[in-house]
Image: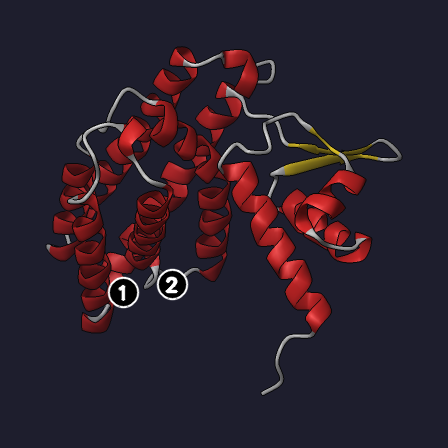
Amino acid sequence: MTSASPARSLSDRTYLQLREDIVAGKLQAGAKLKLEGLMQDYGVGMSPLREALARLIGDRMVTTEAQRGFWVAPMSLAELDDLTRVRSLLETEAISSAIVKGDAAWMQSVTDTFSQLADIEAQLPASAEALTPQLLEAWESSNRAFHASLVAAADSPIIIRFRQQLYQQSERYRRVSLTASRGWRSVTEEHLAIYEAVRDRNVLRACKMTEIHLTRTADEVRKAFAAANPERFLAAT
């Protein structure tokens, strides 16, 4: 098996670094991305930088206009509502299919990822202000793995792919709520409710708990926007 070329590895690394800085808000929504500055900040040449930006455009995290440059994609309540609505449709469809199609190995994977997530959530501090970057990254990784495992047995690769894209687009919004909200909601209980419904192969309850989970996440984002400076995050809605 051949390893990735140095150029591809550099492009991948740049993409991941830029993406994380956008999700974390280090590169703010609506900010102009100056190529010369990015090349210096990320220690990368123009070719891999443009490849990384092209991928981020595909992720809808960067926008571009011909001959005018690149910008961090804006955030808006309208997009948040749209993401939540469509994610709910895809997530529930995928979970329904996975519960029907999933075998014992799939269920064990769901159990394992839930256990890992629960262990991380037991370590979460009482307030978002006390959340360390390391614990945040561990939670994000475990949360991503749990939600991916729930739909892994669905029989529609297209739904799974679109669902993954929407999950990635939602990360910026969720990160705002984690770092700027007034505190933690009972997210552990929400994950437990979803897990138990899937474990019991109760399709209706699993879908309902998933819808509630996504709606409450969107509500937390709204609270975070209201508590912070909305102009920092929001385009016109």
Label disc, if present, on residue 155 of the rendered structure: 2
Work out whether 128 lies above or below 113. Answer: above
Q: Quadrant of the N terminus?
A: bottom right
Task: Label 1: state its secondary structure.
Answer: helix
**Picture coordinates of residue 236, whole percent (x, y):** 60, 13
**Picture coordinates of residue 81, whole percent (x, y):** 45, 25
Left or right of 30? Residue 132 is left
Residue name at image x 18 percent, y 44 percent: 123
Q: Amino acid at mark 1?
A: Lys
Left or right of 89? Residue 235 is right
Provide the residue designation for mark 1: 101
Distance CA(mark 1)–CA(mark 2): 7 Å
**Neighbour tally class for label 1: few under 14, some 14-19, many 20 plus, Cα within 10 Å:** few
Q: Quadrant of the C terminus?
A: top right
Task: Label 2: state its secondary structure.
Answer: loop
The outermost residue toward the right is 67
* One can see residue 22 in this view: yes
**Neighbour tally class for label 2: few under 14, some 14-19, many 20 plus, Cα within 10 Å:** some
Q: Amino acid at mark 2?
A: Asp
Residue name at image x 52 percent, y 32 percent: 25
Between 210 and 68, the one lying in front of the other is 68
Q: Are marks 1 and 2 in contact (CB under 8 Å)?
A: yes
